[in-house]
Image (tube, helix red, strand yellow):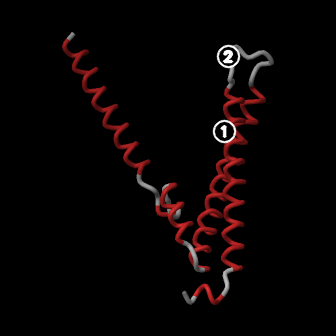
């Protein structure tokens, strides 16, 4: 009986340790993901932006976000189609996995559209800033 309790205890500790390592790794942004800003940082950047370079930085950030959301939507779309094809006609529970995948896909598409609109806005602002404003 002590062996079983000891094995359970050791298994629990190992599970917790593996979960902690996984969470710690996911909290660190990877180098290839580009810059990550909080909402307050983005708001401050937008308020303080007055040069073409600052507007271009914002536009580039939002273009990257749009591309990121498009990639996520593309990945989820494959899952959605797969789940939709295998879901029975009258599912026992709602939402079905296909519904969850569809909702996630729609969320990513919506966020990509918002990021694209902001990228276009800041891109236009970068182009329209006059040379007199740059010298200030």
Work out whether 20 lies above or below 116: above
Residue at 32% x, 33% y: name it.
Answer: 16
Q: Mark 1: give few (<14), some (14-19) or many (20+) Cα within 10 Å.
A: some
Work out whether 29 lies above or below 49: above
Residue 7 drawn at (x, y percent): 26, 21
Q: Mark 2: give few (<14), some (14-19) or many (20+) Cα within 10 Å.
A: few
Residue at 71% x, 30% y: name it.
Answer: 98
The local secondary structure at tag 2 comes to loop
Q: Which mark is residue 7?
A: none
Q: Which mark is residue 104?
A: 1
Q: CA distance from mark 2 to mark 1?
A: 18 Å
Residue at 40% x, 43% y: name it.
Answer: 22
Specify the farthest residue to the top: 1
* Viewer-closest of 23 and 116: 116
Residue at 70% x, 79% y: name it.
Answer: 127
Q: Is residue 17 left or right of residue 122?
A: left
Image quadrant of residue 118? bottom right
The local secondary structure at tag 1 comes to helix
Instruction: Quarter of the image for the C terminus: give it.
Output: bottom right
Residue 18 drawn at (x, y percent): 35, 38
């Amino acid at each position: 009986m002590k062996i079983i309790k000891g094995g359970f205890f050791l298994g629990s500790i190992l599970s917790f340790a593996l979960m902690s390592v996984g969470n710690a790794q996911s909290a660190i942004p990877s180098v290839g993901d580009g810059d990550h800003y909080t909402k307050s940082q983005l708001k401050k950047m937008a308020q303080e932006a007055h040069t073409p370079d600052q507007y271009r930085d914002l536009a580039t950030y939002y273009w990257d976000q749009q591309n990121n959301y498009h990639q996520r939507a593309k990945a989820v779309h494959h899952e959605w189609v797969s789940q939709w094809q295998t879901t029975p006609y009258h599912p026992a529970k709602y939402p079905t996995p296909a519904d969850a995948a569809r909702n996630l896909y729609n969320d990513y598409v919506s966020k990509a559209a918002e990021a694209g609109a902001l990228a276009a806005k800041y891109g236009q602002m970068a182009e329209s800033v006059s040379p007199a404003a740059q010298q200030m």
